[in-house]
Amino acid sequence: MDIAAISTLLSQQKVAQQESVSIMKMAMNTAERNNANLINIMDSAKSLETSVSPNLGTSIDVRV
């Protein structure tokens, strides 16, 4: 192999690696946003649940 071919091959590999890292960062950011949205939805569902029936689920009757 000549030096030009090796240089081109290394350059292409570097670009492919940068593209892969960029795609992985985008996937991680999307997952982070989805997790944050899920937490917000769960928090709002909990507040909705207690506002509809505030007395249900707040105490347990136990006999010994």
Image: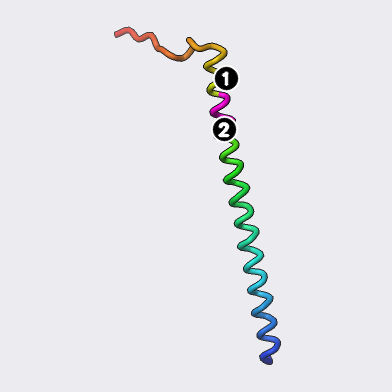
Residue 35 position in % (x across, y down):
57, 40
Residue 52 position in % (x across, y down):
57, 13
Residue drawn at point x = 52 percent, y = 16 percent? 50
Residue holding disc 1: 48
Figure quadrant of the N terminus: bottom right
**Quarter of the view holding residue 61:** top left
Q: Which residues are magenta?
A: 39-45
**Quarter of the view holding residue 6:** bottom right
**Quarter of the view holding residue 4:** bottom right
Above or below residue 50? Residue 1 is below
Above or below residue 4? Residue 29 is above
Residue drawn at point x = 44 percent, y = 14 percent? 58
Q: CA distance from mark 2 to mark 1?
A: 12 Å
The residue most toward the bottom is: 2
Residue holding disc 2: 40
State yes or no: residue 41 in magenta.
yes
Q: Please give left or right for residue 53 compared with residue 8 in the image.
A: left
Figure quadrant of the C terminus: top left
Above or below residue 2? Residue 24 is above
